[in-house]
């Protein structure tokens, strides 16, 4: 049994009825497209339910217009919907209001916004930025490069053998020189869940900010940014039933108020003269130019869709599938699974089959209709630490089932027989 009616959810995703195996030039239409799809790459991107797809087409068909400035009815309708979408996202993560919700392109842009608009101005040679060894490149490379530009020092909290964060090491690294602690909430490679509230306390005890990368947590579990006391929190719509091209940077209002803009242009200004300019209120100060209007409205529809299921139920489903996959992989004596035990991780499992390179494994299981990820998952330093050039990764979402995990295991057995 599952925490909710998975079959009813699957009915909202026609793509799950796709057959694969044919010519990629003609998606889903070729005569060889005869193998039912088994999609297990949700940490990369999730699918989009009909309700969200319809929201996008309803917008373009019914009230497409530019926002914020127009006086005519369509512009007012689009502006209300786009601005209210910020309220929906604010409620979803426990923010105090739309002033704390900046719509960006994705998590990556959210990280860069803070690194450039705050980091470049505030960091210097006496400062340190503390991250973990399991950061995604969206934060690791961003803060690494900003630190180079500003002379700040970068420090990495150790991840132990089991994939847990070494909190004693965190306490050593986070000190009075620390200006920013930037950490992943749920690792997209290990599935490790980081104790972000504890890290926030450590950061605040030393007068530092904490930036939580919520790309893999916001879609898969309840998030309350005030409870964790995050100063910044970032996530992407496309990983949580939303379209690509839309993400969120949450920031505490007082901090965003102080920060200078990231991108300049229209919509983010209040008054412009030849000499200088003043800025719009939050969050519009950080949304320059014509925004991704349809995507923003659809992002809110995706939040509504998930809230209907309930994030506790989403988390429970993720965890049962991750544990099941972990246990089934443990049946192999030539499989290495990375990260904490199956009953203490987010909804993904990265692994290697000893005799088969992850890329070969991924392409073979693809022959069985199974879609998983192979590569470094944008965590190359972590893979160096693991001693793995690459890993295969299965990641689950609300529409996946145990039978689909079984299909993965059957495909792995097929791959092993091929290479045996
Ligand atoms: C932990 C984490 N942080 C940041 C990002 C960046 O998100 P955007 O690409 O939306 O900016 C990702 C994306 N996850 C990658 C994308 O593909 N496979 C993954 O695991 C991620 O998993």
Image (cartoon, rainbow, N blue to C red):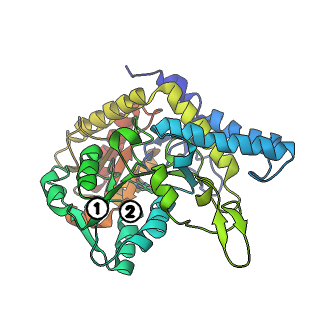
Q: Above or below — where is 178 with respect to 101?
A: below
Which of the image's four quarters has the N terminus? top left
Q: From where the camera sits, is residue 63 visible? A: yes
Q: Earlier along the polypeptide chain: callout 2 or callout 1?
A: 1
Residue 395 falls in image quadrant:
top left
**Rendered residue at 56%/47% (across/down):** 99
**Rendered residue at 66%/61% (across/down):** 268
Relative depth, front residue between 396 and 371: 396
Q: Are marks 2 and 1 in contact (CB under 8 Å)?
A: yes
Residue 267, image x, y percentages = 70, 60
Residue 114, image x, y percentages = 46, 63
Q: Mark 2 points at which residue?
A: 139
Residue 82, image x, y percentages = 68, 44
Q: Local crowd at mark 1 within 10 Å, few (<14), some, or many (≥20)? A: many
**Rendered residue at 50%/42% (across/down):** 240
Q: From where the camera sits, is residue 352 visible? A: no
From the Cβ of disc 2, is ligand 1 less than 8 Å away?
yes
Q: Above or below — where is 164 with respect to 77?
A: below
How many marks are shown on the rendered structure?
2
Which quarter is ligand 1 in?
Answer: bottom left
The numbered mark at residue 131 is: 1
Relative depth, front residue between 104 and 283: 283
The answer for how far apart the CA atoms under marks 2 and 1 are is 8 Å
């Amino acid at each position: 049994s599952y925490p909710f009616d998975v079959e009813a959810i699957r009915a909202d995703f026609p793509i799950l009825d796709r057959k694969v195996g044919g010519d990629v030039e003609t998606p889903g239409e070729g005569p060889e497209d005869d193998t039912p799809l088994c999609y297990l790459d949700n940490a990369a991107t999730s699918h989009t339910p009909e309700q969200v797809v319809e929201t996008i087409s309803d917008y373009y068909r019914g009230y497409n217009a530019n926002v914020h400035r127009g006086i005519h009815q369509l512009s007012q309708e689009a502006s209300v919907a786009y601005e209210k979408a910020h309220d929906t996202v604010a409620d979803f993560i426990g923010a105090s209001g739309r002033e704390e919700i900046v719509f960006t392109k994705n998590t990556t842009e959210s990280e860069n916004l803070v690194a450039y608009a705050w980091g470049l101005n505030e960091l210097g040679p006496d400062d340190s930025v503390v991250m973990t060894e399991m950061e995604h490149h969206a934060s690791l490379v961003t803060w690494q490069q900003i630190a180079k530009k500003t002379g700040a020092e970068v420090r990495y909290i150790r991840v132990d053998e089991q994939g847990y964060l070494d909190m004693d090491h965190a306490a050593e690294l986070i000190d009075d020189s620390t200006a920013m602690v930037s950490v992943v909430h749920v690792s997209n490679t290990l599935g490790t869940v980081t104790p972000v509230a504890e890290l926030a306390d450590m950061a605040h005890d030393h007068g530092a900010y904490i930036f939580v990368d919520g790309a893999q947590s916001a879609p898969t579990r309840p998030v309350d940014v005030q409870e964790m006391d995050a100063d910044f929190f970032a996530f992407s719509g496309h990983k949580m039933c939303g379209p690509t091209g839309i993400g969120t940077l949450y920031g505490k209002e007082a901090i965003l108020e102080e920060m200078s803009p990231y991108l300049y242009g229209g919509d983010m200004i209040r008054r412009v003269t030849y000499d200088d300019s003043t800025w719009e209120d939050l969050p519009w100060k950080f949304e320059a130019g014509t925004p991704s209007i349809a995507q923003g409205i659809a992002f809110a529809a995706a939040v509504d869709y998930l809230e209907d299921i309930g994030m506790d139920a989403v988390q429970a489903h993720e965890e049962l599938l991750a544990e099941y996959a972990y246990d089934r992989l443990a049946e192999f004596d030539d499989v290495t699974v990375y990260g904490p035990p199956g009953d203490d991780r987010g909804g993904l499992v990265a692994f290697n089959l000893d005799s088969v390179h992850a890329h070969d494994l991924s392409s073979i299981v693809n022959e069985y209709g199974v879609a998983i990820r192979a590569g470094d998952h944008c965590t190359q330093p972590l893979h160096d630490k693991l001693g793995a050039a690459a890993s295969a990764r299965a990641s689950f979402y609300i529409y996946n089932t145990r039978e689909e995990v079984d299909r993965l295991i059957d495909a792995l057995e097929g791959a092993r027989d091929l290479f045996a």
